[in-house]
Amino acid sequence: AQSVTQLDSQVPVFEEAPVELRCNYSSSVSVYLFWYVQYPNQGLQLLLKYLSGSTLVKGINGFEAEFNKSQTSFHLRKPSVHISDTAEYFCAVSTNQAGTALIFGKGTTLSVSS
Amino acid sequence: ETGVTQSPTHLIKTRGQQVTLRCSSQSGHNTVSWYQQALGQGPQFIFQYYREEENGRGNFPPRFSGLQFPNYSSELNVNALELDDSALYLCASSSGGLAGGRETQYFGPGTRLLVL
C-alpha cells in the first residue's frame, strides 16, 4: 500500500519570496511521483512529475521538485512566488507512469500576499 | 484547459436518493478514473474504467458504481446517498488502463454534490 504525507497544511508567504512545500511518501513497491495544483473552484492541473532519471524535475509556472529516494521525499520549490500562485497543492503517487489510480496527500494551501 | 468535461457542475440531493454524474473524456483517451474530494481533503480514488470494464477500485462500497460507454465517456452512480457523500467528484481521462503509459491523465473541473 502507498501513502502520502504533506507536512504543512498551510504555508503563508510574501510575494517574491521563495517557498518549499514538503511531501513524504511511503510505498512497498516502486512508485511515480506527481504534484498537482488546484485553483479555487477548479479541477486539478499537473505541475510536474518524476518518472525516472534526473532527481530534479522542472515543471510549469517556475516550479521544480527534487526526488530523494533515501528520504522518500518529493519536495516542491519555487524561488520567487507570485500572488497568482495562491492555490491548493497536492502531492500524489501512482504505480504507473500515466499517474492513474493516484494516492493523494491532504494538500497544502499556499497563500501569497503582497 | 483540458478536453475533459463533467456534468452537472453542481447538484443537491437528499439522503437516500440516487445520483448519476457524467464525464466526457479527452479525445483519444480510453481510460477514465473517478475521484471523490471531500472538503479540505485530497482526492480519493474511487475506480477506473478501461475499454468499458472496471479495472481498478479504491476503498469505496458497492453503492458507488460506474459505466463506460463505447465512446469512452463515463458515468458515476451513487445509490442510497449519505451525508458524507457530499464532495467534489472529479473524473480524469488517460490512455492505457492501469498499466498506463507515459501520457499524463487530465482532470475535469468536477461536479460538486451536496447531500442534505
Image (spheres, coloured by chain):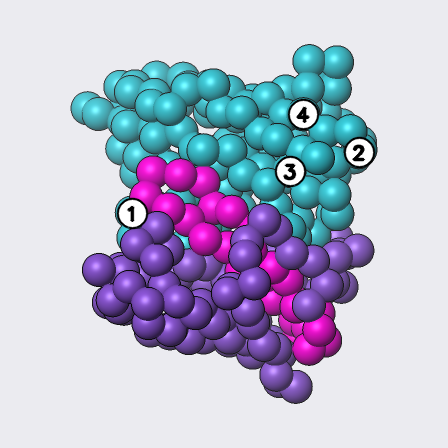
Chain colours: A cyan, B purple
Disc assigned to residue A30 = 2
Identify the element where label 1 is drawn. Answer: loop
Residue at the bottom extreme? B70
Could you say which is closer to the camera, residue A111 or residue B11?
A: B11
Say which residue label 4 marks.
Answer: A26
Residue nearest the observer in this picture, B47 or A67: B47
Q: Which residues are magenta?
A: B28-53
Q: Viewer-nearest of labels 3 and 1?
A: 3
Whether callout 3 and callout 2 share a subunit is answered yes
Q: Check the picture and name the quadrant holding the C terminus of chain B.
A: bottom left
Quarter assignment of residue B86: bottom left
Sequence-first disc among 3 and 1: 1
Q: CA distance from mark 3 to mark 4?
A: 9 Å
Give the residue pinned by disc 1.
A40
Measure how far apart labels 2 and 4 are at the Cα level: 10 Å
Quadrant of the frame with the N terminus of chain B:
bottom left
Q: Is residue B52 magenta?
A: yes
Instruction: Give the amino acid at mark 3.
Output: Val
Q: Is residue B33 left or right of residue A15?
A: right
User: Residue at 34% of width from left, 21% of height from top?
Assistant: A11
Element on which disc 4 rests: strand
What residue type is disc 4 on? Ser
Residue A73 to residue B30: above or below? above
- Which residue is the site of mark 3? A93
User: Marks 3 and 2, how far apart in space?
Assistant: 10 Å
Type of amino acid under label 1: Pro
Callouts 3 and 1 on one subunit: yes
Q: Nearer the viewer, mark 3 or mark 4?
A: 4
